[in-house]
Amino acid sequence: MRCLLIEDDLPIAALIREGLREAGHEVEVCHDGPGGLMRITQERWDLIVLDRMLQGGLDGLDILSAMRLRDDHTPVLVLSALSSLDERIRGLRSGGDDYLTKPFSMDELMARIDALARRTTPRAEADTLTAADLTLERRSRKVFRAGRALQLQPREYQLLEYLMRHQGEVVTRKMLLAAVWGYHFDPETNVIDVQMSRLRNKIDEGGATPLIRTVRGVGFTLEDSGIHVAE
């Protein structure tokens, strides 16, 4: 499996990395919350081993919440020195698939990883998303409107992909912040509106029928037929 390990204790991280590699897994390591979440949002993983308490102002539960809000169902094994029943329940309810307390044995860690691998079935996701004459190719990260290639910046692409994956649904600003930026901004920030305006200008260029609608006071929705945008 391709595994991401997010652990700020360097000796523990080295031990886990070696164990995973000896078991035949590919392993990448991050030592802080923001860096780990960036890798999660930008790449695909088969398994994530996630420390509960991290440096950088973003802890394991923040990362879990952001992942699940963006429909990322990658299996996550949470590691934590917090061993109380309440903390274990909190970790699982936040989106963890398993919770292992420190200190732990490598044999138990590997057994739990093997168990997650056995019970996890790959989720089939379409490589191409469409809405009316708008097409997004996920493998190549290319977007076309009526056959015309659009040049989107990374944030614009991520916004559009999230909207297209949730076609017909109203997505809130909080959902978009977690899915695209990966951590929590002030909900009153206008960063989403600025990026959304730029995205609309590009996909509606040349008088194309608008597909993204603002739901006042809530968020946005993308529909697969032409709509009139009321700001």
Image (spheres, grey):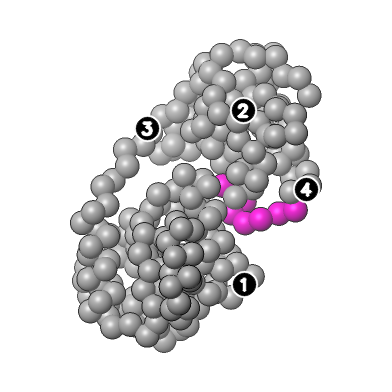
Which of the two labelled residues, at mark 4 and mark 1, occupies the earlier sequence position?
1
Callout 3 environment at 10 Å: few (<14), some (14 to 19), or many (20+)?
few
For label 4, the residue is 189
Q: Main secondary structure of the magenta part?
A: loop
Q: Amino acid at mark 2?
A: Thr
Residue 180 painted magenta: yes
Residue drawn at 53 percent across, 55 percent down: 65
Residue 188 makes an appearance in the image: yes
How much space separates mark 3 and mark 4, taking CA atoms? 32 Å
Q: Amino acid at mark 4?
A: Thr
Which of the two labelled residues, at mark 1 and mark 3, occupies the earlier sequence position?
1
Label 2 or label 3, whichever lies nearer to me, is 2
Q: Secondary structure at mark 2?
A: strand
For label 2, the residue is 221
Which of the two labelled residues, at mark 3 and mark 4, occupies the earlier sequence position?
3
For label 3, the residue is 126
How much space separates mark 4 and mark 1, taking CA atoms? 21 Å
For label 1, the residue is 56
Foreground pick, 112 / 206: 112
How much space separates mark 2 and mark 3, taking CA atoms? 20 Å
In this picture, is 107 found above or below 86?
Answer: below
Residue drawn at 36 percent across, 73 percent down: 100
Give the magenta part as a residue range. Answer: 179-186
